[in-house]
Image (cartoon, rainbow, N blue to C red):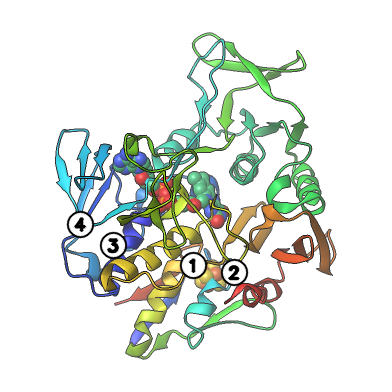
Amino acid sequence: MGGLRAAEALRRFGYTGAITVIGDETWAPYNRPPLSKEVLAGEVVSHETVAFPQRSSTADVGWVLGHRVVSADLDNDTVTTDDGEVFEYSHLVVATGLRPKRQVYPNNIHSGRHIIRTLDDAMGLRDELQPGARVVVLGAGFIGCETAATARKLGCDVTVVAPGTVPMLRPLGNELAQELQRRHEAQGVKFLMKRTVSDLVGEARINAVALDDGTELPCDVLIEAIGSLPNTEWLEGNDIDIVDGLLCDENLRAKTKTGLSWPNVWGVGDVVRFPNRIFDDVPRRVEHWNIPSECAKYVGNAIATGEAGEAFRPIPSFWSDQFDVHILAFGLLALADSSRLVQGSIDGDCVFEYYRGDQLVGAAGIGLRSVVQGYRKNFES
Amino acid sequence: MIKINVDMNKCQHYGMCVFEAPKVFKLNDEDKLEYLATAEDSELGNVEAAIDVCPMQAIFIVD
Ligand SMILES: Cc1cc2nc3c(=O)[nH]c(=O)nc-3n(C[C@H](O)[C@H](O)[C@H](O)COP(=O)(O)OP(=O)(O)OC[C@H]3O[C@@H](n4cnc5c(N)ncnc54)[C@H](O)[C@@H]3O)c2cc1C
Ligand code: SF4
């Protein structure tokens, strides 16, 4: 997504040079969020239903799809793909996103195990979500909970297993998180919190998972949604910081290990760790859908005009759909140490404010869109 | 003139589009999306920006 948006932004801001987008997936850019929601719930998962529209402004962009970049030489301005082709660049936009973390078990069988990041992942999972299938979702973040809701809607018998006390605690805070758990349970999703999977049971294919309390849970389909790792291995060997995503300065330029900035290496999307002055100077990765587009706009403008201008300070926003619950949020809720209900009631539509000390760091709501949208102005410069 | 279509089966009334093209999109008193099916050519940039920010990718320009 970030790659496409960067190409679009470069053209929009008047860049006329050649643009090449290299991606290891064979599909043209598509929208990921439906993969855990409506697309997974549909009869068929197809590229058509999630593909981003192609604009005439980017008709002359060179797409190199199905090829992985294996290395980069930032001193000599080149990247190399898996088939040995070397590409020279004047500017490099790093937008390689994340991949799901995988657990390795003593009995590390593969059949029946799934992750969900790509269209191919969703296609592989869709066929297995048959009515009555016993589905275990490992991890209770947004993607885990959304996938659990979708599997339940498809008639599966769904159990979420996760180490935390309540699902989605970090992004939503205790009160809203507990309410979401209640709403999931009302739809028949089971939660085994403060539990993890210690091993898999089965020979050719998984038929149960062993939990850390010694019990076994029958399982036909295991969905692993335990967080993500940045795709930065291809950048290794350069003078940059990729300890947790690509560290960038407030202009989205990659930083060197000594704190300088590369003039022509930029970060876009999930893969970037960047500071956001709305909140503080601490660089963070932000895995929200609006971030790639915001980064791309900023970087496209900076490259096209030759000037980065003011610091990058996007307003993070996210939404999540689980059963008939539609959550919309602005800000960085995970920074909060307290939250309070400001409108509506928790068992219906409601809006919460999130605070770090007495600083408002975010707002989230179920329904009441206009109220939640109104919080944007609190974060505008 | 540009013609705009929102797939109301997809739209979840998040209202992101409203900020990009307020002349074309708005949330009504019941927080439901209302939009103009046609707009001046000068709105094209804003409508494209609305298309980009729509979480459900529900907005289309019809030729
Ligand atoms: C199932 C799912 C549901 C989501 N739901 C929501 C939601 O409801 N709300 C929300 O706000 N956000 C949601 N998100 C998050 C949102 O989709 C992401 O933030 C967004 O897709 C990030 O875009 P990106 O361009 O940074 O990364 P990506 O879209 O991951 O793009 C990176 C691309 O680079 C490729 N790549 C990686 N390494 C290499 C390499 N070495 N060489 C070549 N190509 C490479 C990858 O294969 C990938 O195609 C969801 C994500 C997922 C997976
Ligand atoms: S941004 Fe998309 S989903 Fe939201 S109100 Fe507009 S059309 Fe509907």
User: Which numbered circle lies on residue A7?
Assistant: 3
Residue named by callout 2 = B14
Disc 2/disc 1 C-alpha distance (Å): 8 Å
Disc 1/disc 4 C-alpha distance (Å): 32 Å
Residue named by callout 4 = A90
Q: Secondary structure at mark 1?
A: loop
Foreground residue, A277 or A189? A277
Relative horizontal placement of residue A118, taking residue A201 as reference (left or right): left
Marks 2 & 3, CB-CB < 8 Å contact: no
Chain for disc number 4: A
Residue labelled 2 has its Cβ within 8 Å of some atom of ligand 2: yes
Q: Quadrant of residue A277?
A: bottom right
Residue labelled 1 has its Cβ within 8 Å of some atom of ligand 2: yes
Relative horizontal placement of residue A4, taking residue A39 as reference (left or right): left
Marks 2 & 1, CB-CB < 8 Å contact: yes
Residue named by callout 1 = B54
Q: Nearer the viewer, mark 1 or mark 4?
A: 4
* Residue A66 visible in the current orientation: no
In the rendered image, the vertical position of residue A7 relative to residue A151, given as above or below: below
Q: Residue at x 64, y 40 (%)?
A: A148
Chain for disc number 1: B
* Residue A306 visible in the current orientation: yes
Residue labelled 4 has its Cβ within 8 Å of some atom of ligand 1: no
Residue A217 in the image: x percent, y percent? 70, 20
In the rendered image, the vertical position of residue A80 relative to residue A15, given as above or below: above
The amino acid type found where label 2 is placed reads Tyr
Chain for disc number 2: B
